[in-house]
Image (cartoon, rainbow, N blue to C red):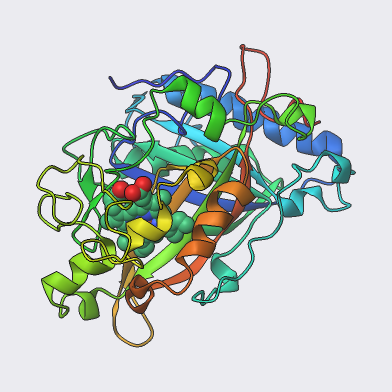
Amino acid sequence: LDRQPFHGRHQAGIVTPQPAAALFVALDVLAEDRGELARLFRILTERLAFLTVGGPVPPRDPRLPPADSGILGPQVLPDNLTGTLAVGASLFDDRYGLAAARPRRLRPMERFPNDSLDARLCQGDLLLQLCANTPETNLHALRDLIRSTPGLVALRWKLEGMLPPHVVKRAGVDTVRNFLGFKDGTANLDARDEALMRRRVWVAPGSGEPAWAADGSYQVVRIIRNMVERWDRTPLGEQERIIGRHKDSGAPLGETREHALPDYAGDPHGTRTPLDAHIRLANPRTAETETSLMLRRGYNYSAGITASGQLDMGLLFVCFQADLDAGFVAVQSRLNGEPLEEYIKPVGGGYFFALPGVREPGGFLGQGLL
Ligand code: HEM
């Protein structure tokens, strides 16, 4: 398994398994008009279709800059690459006359109480998510896309993410550890469950969204710094009560199997799982909160040292949902004030809308929008 199909009803990189390396880059569009914007989308589509399939790089001419950066050598291998393009609310301002086409819930990301947002790490007209087995493949793709779109885009922010490389992580099946040392993904939705994905992840025709948005999905990215120095000095029992799971096994508190279901109805006072434990607030497992289920697809990140001399690392939280407010916003609102906040600080990210897929060669990303 090292090649993800480019064409399809949905873009790859949403319900497809997660390879170990990711690169998120937000772009601002410099296109002068709608025609130029369409040209940009066509170029991005054509390059991503090539990069995800791979092939030989064009012949070189010593008088010209090489047509490929060369960092993967003369043969581009697919390496499980997916490129997923999403649009931000700012693309729908008056520049391109797209205001009426804006997905209904799409807006600039609001500030939640625990956020300490750095404007240099927020928002963007476009978000490109590149995932592959290796960081080199993502960087090669990024350089290819930048070289192919001169004058059409400006880089806004970029962050690379990683997962332990021993699995290509299937949502709802595999779990790997985050930088707090806990298993991540245990209770995630099973991305193979197509009926569930239709209900909770994909925008359906007739859902009140513009017709072009069907088969797309709201994508939320949150750059959440983890205060790992403080966490590493916190007693294990407290860490486990904050999350609501055992650190080694990943099982709910009081259970031994990772995938055992927590019994909140039988624990109304939070004797076993505190009422404010992360997993209990995120998903209280009641009939009323079923609508807030989301597909998480995050990565760990490590980016250097903060101004105050601490490690700058944490979670590049990513989730997809058919309804931004019923999904992410509802869950984050329940999490506001959770004890985990003492150890995490959201510093960037944005709200985006991942475009529907390109069904056939010849079509292009965003075609329905333009
Ligand atoms: C579950 C960590 C931020 C939503 C979990 C789990 C851990 C975890 C260890 C349990 C394993 C699992 O089911 O994946 C973290 C950390 C965060 C963070 C370290 C920040 C750095 C968020 C945010 C949201 C969120 C921002 C959404 C707004 C969820 C959900 C679950 C979950 C929905 C599944 C709960 C369940 O169904 O039982 N998280 N999380 N998390 N988290 Fe987070």
Tell which of 30 and 336 is nearer to you: 336
Residue 300 placement (x, y as % from top left): 31, 55
Determine if residue 315 is in view.
no
Residue 336 placement (x, y as % from top left): 48, 70
Q: Is residue 337 above or below residue 4?
A: below
Name the residue at 89% across, 52% down.
Answer: 94
Q: Can you tell which quarter of the image residue 307 is in? A: bottom left
Q: Is residue 185 above or below residue 112?
A: above
Name the residue at 56% across, 24% down.
Answer: 10
**In this picture, residue 290 sits left or right of residue 155:** left
Residue 367 placement (x, y as % from top left): 74, 25
Location of the C terminus (image quadrant): top right
Q: How many marks?
A: 0
Tell which of 165 and 141 is nearer to you: 165
Location of the N terminus (image quadrant): top left
Residue 32 placement (x, y as % from top left): 84, 46
Q: Can you tell which quarter of the image residue 228 is in? A: bottom left
Name the residue at 34% across, 74% down.
Answer: 339
Tell which of 98 and 334 is nearer to you: 334
**In this picture, residue 355 sits left or right of residue 336:** right
Q: Ligand 1: which quarter?
A: bottom left
Q: Is residue 200 above or below residue 139?
A: above
Determine if residue 243 is in view.
yes
**In this picture, residue 4 sits left or right of residue 122:** left
